[in-house]
């Protein structure tokens, strides 16, 4: 769960491959020169990179003992109440200041 939450917040704060510049560079030849681009994956949008990374987390989990356990079904859709109670919608992009305010 923490790996997924980490990816969601990196996506929302537009860091580590999720910035517009990184996405633009990932689709061009200069991508190898950009330290913000995720060089191990080909992607053309932030959403596509998030999808790729979520699939990797699920794959990694399926190769551990956790795959033998049963998880309780989630009744609600959307962010947990604990996130919503902070005033966060759970979906919008965040500035660094908003991230610090919501997470710390």
Image (tube, rainbow, N blue to C red):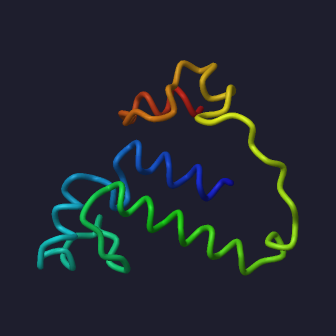
In this rendering, would 87 be left or right of 97?
right
Q: Residue furthest right?
A: 69
Residue 40 higher or lower than 83, as above or below:
below
Q: Which residue is depicted at the point 27% across and 53% down?
A: 19
| Quarter of the C terminus within the rendering | top right
Place of residue 29 in the rendered image (x, y in percent of width and height, measured from the top left): 12, 79
Q: How many marks?
A: 0
| Quarter of the N terminus within the rendering | bottom right
Place of residue 11 in the rendered image (x, y in percent of width and height, measured from the top left): 41, 49
Q: Which residue is depicted at the point 68% across and 26% down?
A: 81
Q: Which residue is depicted at the point 60% across and 24% down?
A: 84
Residue 22 higher or lower than 103, as above or below:
below
In this rendering, would 85 be left or right of 94?
right
Residue 58 higher or lower than 32, as above or below:
above
Place of residue 70 in the rendered image (x, y in percent of width and height, measured from the top left): 87, 61
Place of residue 61 in the rendered image (x, y in percent of width and height, measured from the top left): 70, 71
Specify the quadrant of the image occupied by residue 42: bottom left
Residue 90 higher or lower than 63, as above or below:
above
Q: Which residue is depicted at the point 27% across and 59% down?
A: 45
Q: Foreground residue, 104 or 15? A: 15
């Amino acid at each position: 769960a923490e790996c997924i939450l980490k990816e969601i917040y990196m996506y929302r704060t537009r860091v580590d491959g999720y910035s517009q510049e990184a996405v633009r560079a990932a689709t061009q030849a200069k991508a190898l020169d950009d330290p913000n681009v995720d060089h191990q994956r080909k992607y053309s949008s932030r959403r596509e990179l998030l999808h790729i990374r979520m699939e990797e987390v699920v794959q990694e989990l399926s190769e551990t003992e956790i795959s033998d356990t049963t998880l309780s079904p989630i009744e609600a859709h959307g962010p947990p109440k604990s996130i919503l109670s902070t005033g966060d919608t759970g979906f919008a992009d965040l500035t660094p200041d908003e991230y610090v305010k919501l997470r710390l």
